[in-house]
Amino acid sequence: MTHRTALNGALGLVLTLALLGPVGASPVTDGPEELYRLIDARLELMDEVAAFKWQSGLPVEDREREAVVLEQAVTDALHFGFTPETSRAFFEAQIEAAKSIQRHWLERWQAGEEPPQAADLNEAIRPELSRLGSRIIAAAASAGAVDRERFEAAVAVTGLDPGAREQVFAALEGLKRFEHRLQQILETRVLRVGTTGDYAPFSHRGDATETPRGIDIDLARRLADALEVDVAFVETSWPTLLDDLAAGRFDIAMSGVSRTLDRQRVGYLSVPYYVGGKTAIARCGEAARFGSLEGIDRPAVRVIVNPGGTNEAFVDAHLHRARKVLHQDNRTIFDALAAGAADVMITDRVEVELQTARNPELCAAAPENFTYQEKAYLMPQDTPWKEFVNTWLELAIADGTVAAVFRDHGVEPRLPDSARPDSARPDAARPDAARRTAPQ
């Protein structure tokens, strides 16, 4: 590859972006050739980096920045199961190769050659370098065996020291992945828990800066204790839950997740630890109107729903005449309902019980659940990890830990038939006699 001239400087960066496809798009991998192309594209930007540093009087080496890059690279690599040691070595080799290219151009400019006008390092170049870094590790995950000759033919950036290129290939060849997710968690000593933070009593918080609280947050900490590792809570959302799972952003989702076949198709679901169902909640003065789906599914009725989860899926499948009102923030949706933004909401029985206890303006509208529903934990399709979670959860149900955590949060535990320690537990589909309902 040849160096972009001064006429091509910032334009070269634009052309590079165009060749790589839309910003944020997942790379379309084509075996190792796509991986080689991405590595080459990242190193091709080093003349731009060098030009900016030359014009700004900055040194080639920036240890603080390198540490940031390496930390992000290791985090991204964990999404695909790469061991931190080998992913760090791979990106350290790329950093050294990048510096060799920058030094090459600085020497040429010191000798009198005219440098190009560079794009802004912080605003334009570094964000693209970060995106390329993430795409490189994603491509490495699906590349298969690598070939030295093809690598050297593809990664031919002007100024790249042959020894530095050899180190990149050796580190690429040395990338290793954990055998399974359980091994990754135990060796990294971190359990990454995906949680939405918007679904009381399972996972809730006031804003994104707060540590989430709730039943599943407490149980996540107990799971981490059983593993003898630390827990890290990873923010996810109902619309992005399955995408985040597929991207490897978390090891397990613990957020009041309902067992569905759609989720089972792309992940593994644990044994259930709570049984409930969809039901209706409305302002107490109007709740008697909405005791059945027939009473709800009328053109004048406004049904409020949070997007992306099983609540919206239920509304879309069963209500065809009522008007759906989307409310983006599930943390404030019941306040909106109480204030008159809609007439009724369909959600899980456990949430109805909690919200009617908290808000005197809201009442359960339906005497029975509309559906049967189980809560479980969502994991990647990794059998050893699923088996560990199931064993832990079954024991925690049997010894009363799960029931105690539910009661700590003011919620009566409702276990599946197969998990009940005795026959005295109330039927899961029967509404709690203590809950407050509107006059029928």
Image (spheres, grey):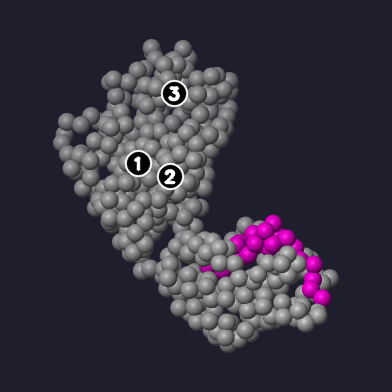
Of marks 3 and 2, which one's residue comes earlier in the chain? 2
Q: Main secondary structure of the magenta part?
A: helix
Q: Amino acid at mark 2?
A: Thr
Does residue 123 show up magenta in the picture?
yes
Of marks 1 and 2, which one's residue comes earlier in the chain? 2
Q: Residue at x 35, y 18 (%)?
A: 436
Give the extent of the magenta segment: 114-139
Mark 1 in CB contact with mark 2 (< 8 angstroms): yes
Does residue 346 show up magenta in the picture?
no
Q: Secondary structure at mark 3?
A: strand
Read off the residue under disc 2. Answer: 195
Q: Nearer the viewer, mark 3 or mark 2?
A: 2
Residue found farthest to the right: 7
Q: Residue at x 53, y 28 (%)?
A: 304
Read off the residue under disc 1. Answer: 216
Read off the residue under disc 3. Answer: 281
